[in-house]
Image (spheres, rainbow, N blue to C red):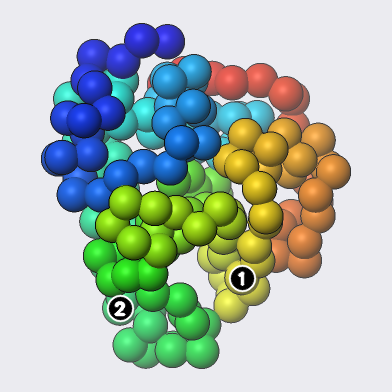
Amino acid sequence: MAGELSWAEVEEAMGFAFPEDFKAVAATFPTGAFGGRIYFISPIQSAESLGMFKDRLEITISSFHEGREVLPDYFPHRFHPEYPGLIPWAVDDEHAYFWNAVSPAEPDGKIFFLENTGPDWGAYEGSIEDFLIDILSGSFTHPGLYSNLNEKPRMYDEY
């Protein structure tokens, strides 16, 4: 999939660098859903998709900043634009998925995730591609990830 926007344009608009594994996924998959459940926005796809990515970032980060004020134990991490700070890259109905930007230009190589109804944070050491394969196949499990993710068809739906 070739995007209408360059990474330089997207990174300038967002004010941070995207990790290489995110770029690889976004260059391969348009905005859509993995397994019909994990919603992903490719910010290079178009100006509209970049706007969707910005909107999701702002909504998610605002919610997490507000949540941290009320329940600081539930939100132990910093969130963009704080450094090091988590930046959301996908969501599903029960989870939010993040990478950790340890500086304005570098991620730390971990995927963080949160089960939305409680303070059950988890981390995965590895790339976004490997994480998606492992959770959708059931190879990676965690108490904060629902086990039925691997029961969904292995497909990608563009939206």
Front disc: 2 or 1 = 1
Please provide percent x and percent y for residue 13: 14, 40
Q: Identify residue for label 1.
A: 121
Give the position of the C terminus as an image quadrant.
Answer: top left
Please provide percent x and percent y for residue 88: 41, 53
Toward which corner of the image does residue 81 lie, by quadrant?
bottom left
Toward which corner of the image does residue 137 lie, by quadrant?
top right
Toward which corner of the image does residue 129 lie, by quadrant?
top right
Residue that appears at 74% across and 25% down: 153
Whether residue 129 is visible, yes or no, is yes
What number is the disc on residue 66? 2
Amino acid identity at mark 2: Glu
What number is the disc on residue 99? none
Q: Residues within 10 Å of mark 2 (few under 14, many from 20)?
A: few
As helix, strand or loop, the secondary structure at mark 2 comes to helix
Q: Residues within 10 Å of mark 1 (few under 14, many from 20)?
A: many
Q: Residue furthest right?
A: 139
Residue that appears at 18% across and 49% down: 15
| N-term-proximal mark, 2 vs 1 | 2
Residue that appears at 36% across and 10% down: 2
